[in-house]
Image (tube, helix red, strand yellow):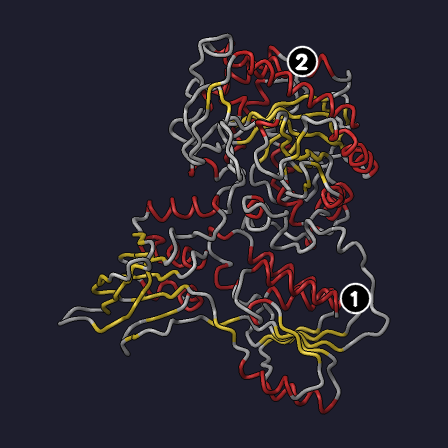
Amino acid sequence: MGYESLFDPLEIGDVTLRNRIMSSGHQTTLVSDHLPTEDFTAYHRARAQGGAGLIVLEAHAVDESGLLTSHTIDASRDAIVDAYEPVAEQLHDDGAAVFAQLFHGGRERYTGDYAPPAPAPSDTPTDRLKVVPRPLTTAEVRELIDSFAAAAERMDRAGLDGVEIVGSHSYLPAQFWSPHLNDRTDEYGGDLESRCRFTVDIATQIRERTSDDFVVGVRLSTEERHRRGLDFSETIPIIEHIDAACDLDYWSIVVGSSSTHRSCSYIVPPATKDHSVVEQPGETVKELVDAPVIVTSRINEPEIGDRLIREGAADVVGMTRALIADPAMPQKVTNGNREDITSCVACNQGCIGRYQEGLPIRCTVNPETGREREFADDDTVETASAVTVVGGGPAGLVCATAAAERDHDVTLLEQADRLGGQVRHYADLSHRGAFGEWIDTLATRAADAGVDIQLETRFEPADLEGATADDSTDAVVLATGAVGRVPDISITEDARVVTPGELLADPDSVRGDAVLVSDWDGNEAALDVAMACSESDRAASVELATATYSPGENVQQYVQNQLLGTLSERNVTFTPHTRVAEIGAADGKGAGSDVVLENIHSETRERRDGIDVVVFAHRGEVAYEPFREAAAQTDVSIHRVGDAWAPRSLDEAVREGYELGREL
């Protein structure tokens, strides 16, 4: 299909976009002393060079009180001008237009080593971040308006094309215009006009203090998606009033709110959500305003973006995570290489997940993201080596491809009849996104790079000795993953005990059963199992007992929120702070097994009767021992990557596979 709508140029104010693809404002943590770093520049240049039409740089604090974290870029200092002049120049040279978000979170704020009072229109607390703000004085409100305008001036002086006033997700401007959060009695509270005055005054002052061709837009959540939040019927008059009062160049619309656990998941929607949540609002807002409308949600494929524009739901589409996963996505589409795009799987681990941990941006499916400078050179080797990669999971596929692209002679051996390793266990789950498509892309890319892929082929320890004897292999990479782990506890012989991989291979095996899922470290595998068992009432009952403080504790919070919400709706029982201590035979004539649960703090115990199946969602067990002796006796270079080295996450598997493939 064609993508004419997606690649049709567009004017926003006096700025011409080469296409309708936008990288929306998102935090990178590629920041030092509240200023962008060289890694920040390289990261955004990769997206500009890959063909994005518009790059909106992340949320910039307009005032010291708006520094959301220790790695928020500070636009209240003149130092930002010198920092951004080369960034703007290089991104323009790469063909992209460049805007910056102007931000103040008000009551929506993380806390660091010191938590000063969070300023807001009123003292209404925020449920999710547990912040009780202090009301701003009228003088302070005016000072903040000036701060927004001053920050825009700095962006103009630095050579950026425009700014975006961030009123989305219940941040400060939305706290003013929301009647649920603003109980002020001065000129910035009361009726609609007064509640919108904060935003109108900001936009007006920016217009007065910046160049005539400087673009000004507003970002807004059309629906905040929680019971005490704004709905679309309330945001429509807000949009109409602000649009009539201001000379805006564009509107950027999203859904969701930072205020609650449920609504915050729409900020970076997991795989359980799609673009449809903004489709109808986009159509409506386009009818309300004359300026271009930007729409952002989970628009992860060029076909979706093209259709939204063609059918009148958007003028520009935010495809941020698609560009995080593959910065060359626009270029690949225009060059006819659609099948080579690395799709975002919406896992949220490397992007927003790392930001929330205070770590630099990465991507689970793209090991170069955030490390563009480190991998700038693509040199091939002078002398090719014969490399055997054992294991066709993500670590093995990525390693084999990276090595083959450097001109090594690579053979990949996989004992199963298909590639993908453990990812195949959950790739088909509806809440897991495009993992299956990603594995297929990795397999195609490996084959295109010249990797000799041999399925249903085992590699035994004796093969290491053979490699030494006939000098056929220079290096062996063990990417054999890990096997499911069952803890060393007393388990009756008749108990039905399985691992997540075994359960997900045949979820109907638990139909009508009482299932207990034992979660050791708050991992997503336990949630996957609970979702599969509870789907369509497959199991009679599901209890998730976790040895952490909450189920999914180590899952990115937006994904965790959505899955726990669904599991709650399905009446799954959550039992925190608990491990399985033993599994015994059922007392008397009861069916199933009796499971003893132990509180990890007090070590007190309680019994669950009649459990038919226990699923141990624990970290895996490395199956390296059979190779240890043979490896010690061979001259062949032996390497291990991913779970074959130690069971961890998919991020480490992909990273280690890629790094080793480039180092061989």
- The structure residue drawn at horizontal position 70% and vertical position 74%, both measured from the top left corner, is 452
Using the numbered discs, state the Cα–Cα distance from disc 2 to disc 1 in whole angstroms.
55 Å
Label 1: which secondary element: loop
Q: Which of marks 2 and 1 is nearer the N terminus?
A: 2
Give how far across and how far down residue 332 sits, in percent. 74, 48
- The structure residue drawn at horizontal position 47% and vertical position 69%, both measured from the top left corner, is 620
User: Which residue is at the far front?
Assistant: 114
Residue 489 lies left or right of residue 168; in this view the side is left
Give how far across and how far down residue 496 sits, in percent. 31, 71
For residue 158, what is the image quadrant? top right
Q: Nearer the viewer, mark 2 or mark 1?
A: 2
Task: Give the crowd class for mark 2: few <14, some 14-19, many >=20 residues within 10 Å.
Answer: some
Residue 443 lies left or right of residue 527; in this view the side is right
Give how far across and how far down residue 650 sits, in percent. 56, 60
Establish if 86 lies above or below 660: above
Residue pointed to by mark 2? 205
For residue 144, what is the image quadrant? top right
Residue placed most toward the observer, 651 or 591: 651
- The structure residue drawn at horizontal position 59% and vertical position 56%, both measured from the top left corner, is 437
For residue 462, what is the image quadrant? bottom right
Residue 87 lies left or right of residue 104; in this view the side is right
Is residue 172 at least partly visible in the picture?
yes
Give how far across and how far down residue 216 sits, in percent. 68, 21
Residue placed most toward the observer, 185 or 204: 185
